[in-house]
Amino acid sequence: MSTTQRTISATPQRVDAVLCDGWNYADWVVGAVHVRSVDKQWPKPGSRVHHRVGGWPLTIADNTEVISYVPGQSLELQARMWPFGEATVRLDWEPAPQGNCRVTMVEQFVHGPALALRNRAADLLLHARNTEALARLENLTHKYDD
């Protein structure tokens, strides 16, 4: 399991706005390259972002499903990337000093061949990937500036 935390220079409401727009998914998730469609109910549990992952020309069509969503607080996802497997990703965000927001991202493989990668080395790679994902998330929050 990989846990990554970042204090973002945006309010929790801005973080929530970015995550509630499924069309932003490929802009902050490292490895997702294209959003094909977003269920109208996103981010209600059971709704999905349909995306492509990988690098051209070797991309894979798959989807990510919402497990749970607490407005203004947390989002838990089941990310699929078959034939490699699936991972759960949980994002929690809360107010931080000076109008900022502390975001915690926890990711772990749960199904498929990627389970064999559940070790310290894989966790370090996930941490590096998720550090970049949270930096991208922060950049997207500025798209919602007044």
Image (cartoon, rainbow, N blue to C red):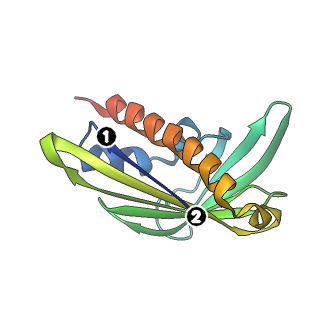
In this rendering, position of residue 6 left or right of residue 101: right
Outermost residue toward the front in this view: 120
The type of residue carrying mark 2 is Met
Q: Residues within 10 Å of mark 1 (few under 14, many from 20)?
A: many
Quadrant (top left/top right/bottom left/bottom right) for the N terminus: bottom right
Left or right of 34 on screen, residue 98: left
Q: Is residue 24 visible?
A: no
Mark 1: amino acid: Ile
Residue at figure coordinates x 86%, y 31% from the top left:
57
**Which of the 4 image quadrants contains residue 108?**
bottom right
Q: Quadrant of residue 75?
A: bottom left
Badge 2 is on which residue?
Answer: 1
Name the foreground residue: 54 vs 143: 54
- Residue topped by disc 1: 8
How far apart are the alpha carbons under marks 1 and 2?
A: 22 Å
Q: Earlier in the sequence, mark 1 or mark 2?
A: 2
